[in-house]
Amino acid sequence: MPINSVLKFLRRLSPLALLALGGCSIANFPLLDSAGPIGQHEYQLILIAFLLMLIPVVPVIVMTLWFARRYRASNDKATYAPKWGHSNKIEAVVWSIPIIIVGGLAILTWVTTHSLDPYKPIASKVKPVRIEAISLNWKWLFIYPDEHVASVNELVIPTGVPVNFRLTSDTVMTSFFIPRLGTQIYAMAGMKTRLHLMADKPGTFTGWNSQLSGEGFSGMHFKTVATSKAGYEAWLNKVRQSPKTLDAITYKELEKPSSHAPVTYYSQVQPKDLFAQVINKYMHGPTHASAMTAHTTPASSK
């Protein structure tokens, strides 16, 4: 059976299976309802791996039930062979099938690890949107460096346009994850990670920190809105109307721990290399220690 036919069958089957397992809908499992090409590839990877792992599981379940019935004490017709202890055919099947499955999973893992590398840009003729994400206690700050605006706990992106993320943390290690768009990646203090995503249909998706990070962890969610290019421009114009500026003083306030922080807009970001300064403040030496007050352009911003 072609793999596309298998994927279509499992896609139809998965919501029914979830309903049978507890009355849940597919909306409770966002990984099964992808809204972007990266999420779709990862969804297919999950289904293929699931199918491969079913190969030894289903026969074992069937044979367990069949053996229990056939060799029950009341069945006098079943063959009784108390001295039997080995079969080359059975050994060949028992060992060859797992080896083939593990080999297939190894090849699949190798290929998809490279094709779904979070640092690999998404091929597109459209200019990508650049976003700098900073993890704080317990909120997310999103800076749009090309637009010179920022927002807290709200991420707005245009559909059909690649989004290039640069991520860091100004607190403990956290994990940036929008399940319907795919790929979880860590954000760490003093380090910069990258992520490339894209939404191919409009909608509002939940994003969160999936790494336990302290008392306010449960409220560290953000709203991701995928909208048309016109809607994206309208949102940018709305943000530009905000009277608030993200400067050193405002950022110090954001650094203070707070859970379930409200959505906030900043029409200006000063200094423009704020993301790089957040990274460099964790570097050793007196120069980097005062990075938030000294206006420099460090190498890590390149």
Image: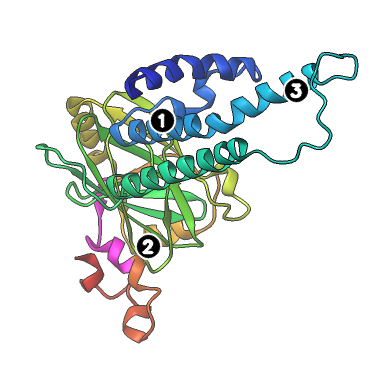
* Tag 2 secondary structure: helix
Of badges 3 and 2, the one in the foreground is 3
Which residue is painted at 38% across and 57% down in the image? 250
Which region is colored magenta? 267-277
Which residue is painted at 33% across and 62% down in the image? 192
Quadrant position of the N terminus in the picture: top left
* Residue type for callout 3: Phe
Mark 2 closeness class: few <14, some 14–19, many ≥20 residues within 10 Å: few
Magenta stretch contains residue 232: no
* Tag 1 secondary structure: strand
Measuring from the top left, give residue 144's x and y in whole percent. Answer: 24, 48
Q: Is 160 drawn above or below residue 73 in the view shown?
A: below
Q: Which residue is mark 1?
A: 205
Q: Which residue is mark 2?
A: 249
Q: Residue furthest left?
A: 125
Q: Is residue 71 left or right of residue 74?
A: left
